[in-house]
Amino acid sequence: MDENEKAIEAIAKGEFEEALELLNKAIEKNPDDATAYINFGNILAEVGESERALSFYQRSLNIDPNAAAALYGAGNVSYNAEEYAEALKLYQQAHKAGLDDGSLHYMMGLAYYQTEKTAHALACFQRALEWDESDTEARFYYGMCLARTEQLDEAVTQFQQVVEEDDKHADAYYNLGVASLMKDSVREAITYFEKAVEAQPDHMLALNGKEQAEKMLEE
């Protein structure tokens, strides 16, 4: 097992300092080891050292311009910085370079969603679910895209499956409440808003939705 493989094991255990020592050794042995720079960047990104992470991803790309994992990592840094258009460009480059998995399609979907390219986002979340049907967050955002495109019944089906998989998913309960209001099922809406608040007591949208729905019952 080489230093990179040992470092990956250490990263999985959360032993970042040990992983960094191993990666430093890997780079000293082989300064042209693109993988070591990627793993180094991943650790820095994980601990919030975004600028340093990007510099390591760039070093990897200087060695191998088609290092898909470096492009993906840089895309995640850009996404977390709310630079969604840049993130999307990097994800697309990673895909072109050969990366094709559920995580990439999920993150591409988020980037499209944040830039309001809903049709593209919907397709990406659908692809992510094809990779992993148990990806609850991909399913939630797939439902959100369906709701945005006025496919309300289909969206409700997805949100219901989300809360079956995660009974503490406040946002899914909230959106089920909104859908119930749109169908004039006020009491049902209140129940969903209450479940959202139970899961997340400071969910202001659900608190407001519950208040408004209760006023509708009083009228």
Image: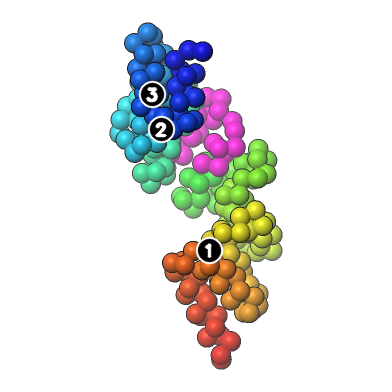
Disc 1 marks which residue?
Answer: 199
Q: Is residue 30 toward the left or the right of residue 13 in the image?
A: left
Q: Nearer the viewer, residue 109 or 116?
A: 109
Query: Residue 64 placed where, x, y %?
Result: 43, 17
Q: Residues within 10 Å of mark 2 (few under 14, many from 20)?
A: many
Identify the disc placed on residue 74.
2
Q: Quadrant of residue 55?
A: top left
Q: Main secondary structure of the magenta part?
A: helix
User: Which stretch appears magenta?
Assistant: 87-107
Please tell me which residue is depicted at 55% across the width and 28% down the height of the picture.
99
Image marks 2 and 3: residues in contact by CB distance under 8 Å: no
Tell which circle, 1 or 3, labels the residue nearer the N-terminal end. 3
Please state which amino acid type lies under the numbered disc 3: Glu
Q: In 3D space, how far apart are the residues under numbered discs 2 and 3 (Cα atoms)? A: 23 Å
Q: Residues within 10 Å of mark 1 (few under 14, many from 20)?
A: some
Q: In 3D space, how far apart are the residues under numbered discs 2 and 1 (Cα atoms)? A: 33 Å
Q: Is residue 161 toward the left or the right of residue 70 in the image?
A: right
Q: Is residue 202 visible?
A: yes
Disc 3 marks which residue?
Answer: 18
Judged by depth in the image, the label closer to the viewer, 2 or 3, is 3
Please tell me which residue is depicted at 51% across the width and 50% down the height of the picture.
113
